[in-house]
C-alpha cells in the first residue's frame, strides 16, 4: 500500500561552516563567490550533486514515502530506454568522430550554429540550478529573477554581442591554445598557457569528484533493484562514459539535443498541470504583498512574518534586505566576470566548435534562449504548485524549512505514469549532459595541450584520437575513484568556486583590452588571486562575501599590473598579428599605429559603444524572457503582455543593431583593412 506523501524537515538551514563531515552534499558550495552568505541553503548551478540532495532527503527518513517512490514500470522502461539510446548514439557517430582530433573534440567544426547553440544551452540546464531557482522564486518572488546575475547568466549576452566572435577568430582547439595567439611561446606565454591548463583540469576533477555519490542518491529511490546508491552512480557514469568515449563532441551534442527535448517536454507538462490545478487567488494567498512585482527599491520590502515567519529570518541572515544594493553589486561583479570571456571548460569548447566567428555569435544567441526559456517554464510550474499545495507543510517546518523537497514532491504527486519517467530521464540527462561536456573538454586539454605539445607533436591525426579514447577512460575512472573516496564534497566544490572564479577575472579582462598586458602578468594574477582566495577566508572568516570577492579582485589586479609592468611586453609582431586577427576594442592604439604604418587601410574596432548598448538591451531582453513564463503560469496576463512586449521590442532592436551587423560574411577580418 502506498502511503500518503508528505514533506518533512530533514535539511535545516545550517551554516556552511558547520556542515557535518562525511555529508556528501552540503549547502550551496559557491556561497562566497556568488554573494550568498554561508547561512543559506541553496544550490550551485553546476553541482548536479547538490540538487540531488533534495531527493536523498526526501526519501531518507521513515514516516513518509522516503525509501522508495512509486514509479511505474513504464517510467523505468523510459529511463532505461534513454540510457540505451545514448550508447547507441555514441556508437553511431564513432567513425565520424575518429577522423582526427578536431573531429573528436570539436565535431570537426562542421555542425550548424543552431545545433551547437541548443547543445550548449542544454549543458547549462541541471537539477541543482533548477531547484535553487525554485527556492529563490518562492522566497523573493518575481524579484528573485534578478538573482540570475549571481553567476552571472548574462555572460552569454557578452559572448553573443562580441566576445564569442573574438574567441572564434583565433581558430584554435582549446582555451589554453588560444593563449599562444595572445602571449606567444616565450616564458610568459608558456606560464600563461600552463595556468589555463591547470585551471581547466582542476575544474574537471572538481566536478567529477562531487558528482558521483549524490548521483547514486538521486537514482536509488526510483529503481526497484535494491542496489546500493554507489552502484547506480557507477552504472550511470559508465553509460555516460561509453558514449562520451565513442563519439567525442558528436556524442556530447547529440545527447544535449535529446536532453533539450526531454526537459522541454517535462517543462510543458508541469506548466500545464500547474495552470490547471491552481488559480491566481490561491497563489497570492500563500505569498506576501508585492511578491509578484518584478521591480524593487533599495529595500526588499517583502513581509513573510504572517505567511511563513521563518523566511523573515532567512532574508535577514542572507543580507538580502537591502536588495537594491545587492543587485547593484551583482551587476558590477557580473560585468567583470562576463568581460573576462568564457572560462576554459566546455563553454569555450562550444564556441570553438562553430564553423566561423559569425556562427559563434549566433550560437550564443540560441544558447541563451535554450538555457532559460524552457527552464523557467519548469521553475514557475514547480514553484506555483509548491506554493499552493505545500505551503502549510513548509510553514510547519519552522526554522528548518527545506524548499529542496518541492520538486520531488511535485514529481511524486502530480505527474501521471509516463510523464514521471520522462522528467526523471530528463534530469538524469541533465547530469549526463554536463558530465560528458566536462570530460570532453578536460580530455581536449590533456591531449592537445599536454601530450601533443610536450610529448609527441608529429603523430598522425588518428593517433591523437586514440589517446582521446585512453584519456577519456582515465578521466572517467578518476572521477569514479574520487567519488568513492570523497567524504566531504562541499570542501571540493567550495575550493573550486571560491578559489578559481574570482582569480580568473582580472587577468582575463586585461588580456582582451590592454595591449601592454603580457603572459607574466596573466599567470601571476591568476596565481595571486587563487592564493588569496585560499588564505583570506581562513584569516578573516567573518568577512562579508562582497568584501571577499572585491579583495580577491584587488589583489589579483595589483599583482597582474605590477608583474606586467616589471617585465617586458610581448613581441611587437605577435601583438600586431593578434590585433589584425581578433581586432578587439580597448587600449590598443600603439599597436594600431604600428599596424597602420604597414597597412594604412587597416581600420580599428569602432564598435565599443554599440556593443555596450547591445549588451544592455540584451540583458533587459533576457530578464523579459525569464519573467514571461512566470507570469504566464501565474495567469497575470497584463504583466505577461508587458514582458512579451519588452521581449519583442528588444529582439527588434537587436535585429538592427546587432544581427544585421553580423548577417553578412563569416566574421573573419581581412588582414589589410
Image (cartoon, rainbow, N blue to C red):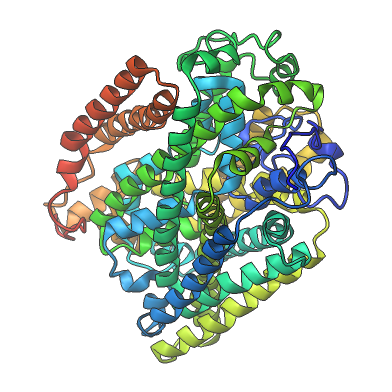
Q: Residue at x 48, y 70 (%)?
A: 86
Q: Position of residue 616 (x, y in %)?
A: 34, 29
- Tell me the residue at 51%/73% (across/down): 84
Is residue 117 visible to the viewer in this orientation of the structure? yes
Q: Nearer the viewer, residue 169 or 95?
A: 95
The residue closer to the viewer here, 179 or 489, is: 489
Q: Position of residue 283 (x, y in %)?
A: 54, 18
Q: Residue pushed farthest front?
A: 1
Is residue 187 among what the camera can see? Answer: no
Residue at screen point 50% across, 66% down? 82
Q: How many marks?
A: 0
Left or right: 510, with 219 as reference point? left
Vertically, is 6 above or below 361? above
> Residue 589 is drawn in which quadrant?
top left
Q: Is residue 412 left or right of residue 38?
A: left
Q: Residue at x 67, y 51 (%)?
A: 70
* Residue 591 point in image, percent of width and height: 30, 51
- Looking at the image, residue 277 sits to the left or right of residue 41; the answer is left
Give the quadrant of the C terminus: bottom left
Amino acid at each position: 500500500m502506498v502511503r500518503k506523501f508528505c514533506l518533512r524537515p530533514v535539511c535545516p538551514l545550517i551554516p556552511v561552516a558547520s556542515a557535518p563531515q562525511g555529508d556528501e552534499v552540503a549547502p550551496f558550495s559557491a556561497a562566497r563567490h556568488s554573494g550568498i552568505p554561508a547561512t543559506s541553503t541553496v544550490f550551485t548551478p553546476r553541482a548536479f550533486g547538490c540538487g540531488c540532495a533534495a531527493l536523498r532527503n526526501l526519501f531518507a527518513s521513515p514516516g513518509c514515502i522516503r525509501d522508495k517512490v512509486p514509479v511505474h514500470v513504464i517510467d523505468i522502461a523510459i529511463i532505461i530506454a534513454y540510457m540505451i539510446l545514448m550508447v547507441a548514439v555514441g556508437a553511431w557517430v564513432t567513425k565520424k568522430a575518429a577522423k582526427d582530433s578536431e573531429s573528436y573534440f570539436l565535431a570537426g567544426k562542421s555542425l550548424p550554429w543552431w545545433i551547437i547553440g541548443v547543445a550548449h544551452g542544454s549543458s547549462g540546464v541541471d537539477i541543482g540550478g533548477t531547484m535553487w531557482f525554485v527556492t529563490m522564486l518562492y522566497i523573493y518572488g518575481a524579484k528573485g529573477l534578478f538573482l540570475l546575475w549571481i553567476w552571472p547568466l548574462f555572460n552569454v549576452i557578452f559572448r553573443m554581442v562580441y566576445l564569442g566572435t573574438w574567441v572564434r577568430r583565433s581558430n584554435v582547439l582549446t582555451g589554453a591554445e588560444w593563449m599562444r595567439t595572445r602571449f606567444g611561446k616565450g616564458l610568459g606565454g608558456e606560464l600563461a598557457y600552463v595556468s589555463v591548463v591547470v585551471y581547466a583540469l582542476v575544474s574537471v576533477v572538481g566536478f567529477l569528484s562531487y558528482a558521483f555519490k549524490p548521483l547514486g542518491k538521486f537514482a536509488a529511490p526510483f529503481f526497484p533493484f535494491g542496489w546500493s546508491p554507489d552502484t547506480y552512480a557507477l552504472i550511470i557514469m559508465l553509460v555516460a562514459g561509453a558514449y562520451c568515449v565513442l563519439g567525442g563532441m558528436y556524442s556530447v551534442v547529440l545527447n544535449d539535443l535529446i536532453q533539450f527535448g526531454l526537459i522541454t517536454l517535462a517543462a510543458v507538462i508541469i506548466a500545464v498541470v500547474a495552470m490547471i490545478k491552481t488559480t491566481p487567488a490561491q497563489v497570492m494567498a500563500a505569498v506576501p504583498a508585492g511578491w509578484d512585482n518584478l521591480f524593487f527599491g533599495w529595500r526588499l520590502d517583502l513581509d513573510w512574518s504572517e505567511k511563513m515567519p521563518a523566511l523573515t529570518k532567512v532574508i535577514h541572515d542572507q543580507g538580502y534586505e537591502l536588495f537594491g544594493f545587492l543587485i547593484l553589486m551583482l551587476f558590477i561583479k557580473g560585468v567583470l566576470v562576463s568581460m573576462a570571456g568564457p572560462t576554459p571548460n566546455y563553454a569555450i569548447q562550444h564556441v570553438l566548435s562553430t564553423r566561423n566567428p559569425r556562427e559563434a555569435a549566433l550560437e550564443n544567441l540560441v544558447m541563451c534562449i535554450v538555457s532559460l526559456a524552457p527552464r523557467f517554464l519548469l521553475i514557475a510550474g514547480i514553484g506555483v504548485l509548491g506554493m499552493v499545495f505545500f505551503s502549510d507543510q513548509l510553514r510547519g517546518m519552522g526554522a528548518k524549512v527545506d524548499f529542496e523537497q518541492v520538486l520531488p514532491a511535485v514529481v511524486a504527486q502530480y505527474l501521471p505514469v509516463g510523464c514521471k519517467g520522462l522528467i526523471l530521464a530528463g534530469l538524469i540527462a541533465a547530469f549526463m549532459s554536463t558530465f560528458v561536456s566536462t570530460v570532453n573538454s578536460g580530455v581536449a586539454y590533456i591531449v592537445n595541450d599536454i601530450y601533443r605539445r610536450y610529448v609527441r607533436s608529429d603523430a598522425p591525426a588518428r593517433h591523437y584520437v586514440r589517446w582521446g579514447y585512453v584519456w577519456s577512460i582515465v578521466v572517467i575512472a578518476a572521477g569514479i575513484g574520487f567519488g568513492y573516496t570523497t567524504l566531504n564534497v562541499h570542501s571540493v566544490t567550495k575550493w573550486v568556486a571560491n578559489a578559481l572564479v574570482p582569480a580568473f577575472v582580472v587577468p582575463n579582462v586585461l588580456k582582451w583590452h590592454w595591449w601592454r598586458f603580457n603572459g607574466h602578468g596573466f599567470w601571476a594574477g591568476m596565481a595571486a588571486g587563487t592564493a588569496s582566495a585560499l588564505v583570506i577566508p581562513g584569516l578573516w572568516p567573518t568577512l562579508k562575501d562582497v568584501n571577499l570577492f572585491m579583495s580577491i579582485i584587488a589583489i589579483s589586479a595589483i599583482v597582474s599590473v605590477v608583474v606586467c609592468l616589471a617585465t617586458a611586453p610581448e613581441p611587437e609582431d605577435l601583438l600586431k598579428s593578434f590585433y589584425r586577427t581578433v581586432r578587439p576594442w580597448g587600449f590598443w592604439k600603439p599597436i594600431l599605429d604600428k599596424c597602420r604604418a604597414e597597412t594604412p587601410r587597416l581600420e580599428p574596432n569602432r564598435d565599443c559603444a554599440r556593443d555596450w548598448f547591445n549588451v544592455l538591451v540584451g540583458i533587459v531582453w533576457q530578464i523579459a524572457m525569464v519573467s514571461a513564463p512566470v507570469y504566464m503560469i501565474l495567469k497575470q496576463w497584463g504583466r505577461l503582455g508587458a514582458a512579451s512586449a519588452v521581449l519583442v521590442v528588444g529582439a527588434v532592436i537587436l535585429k538592427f543593431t546587432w544581427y544585421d551587423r553580423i548577417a553578412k560574411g563569416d566574421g573573419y577580418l581581412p588582414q589589410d583593412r
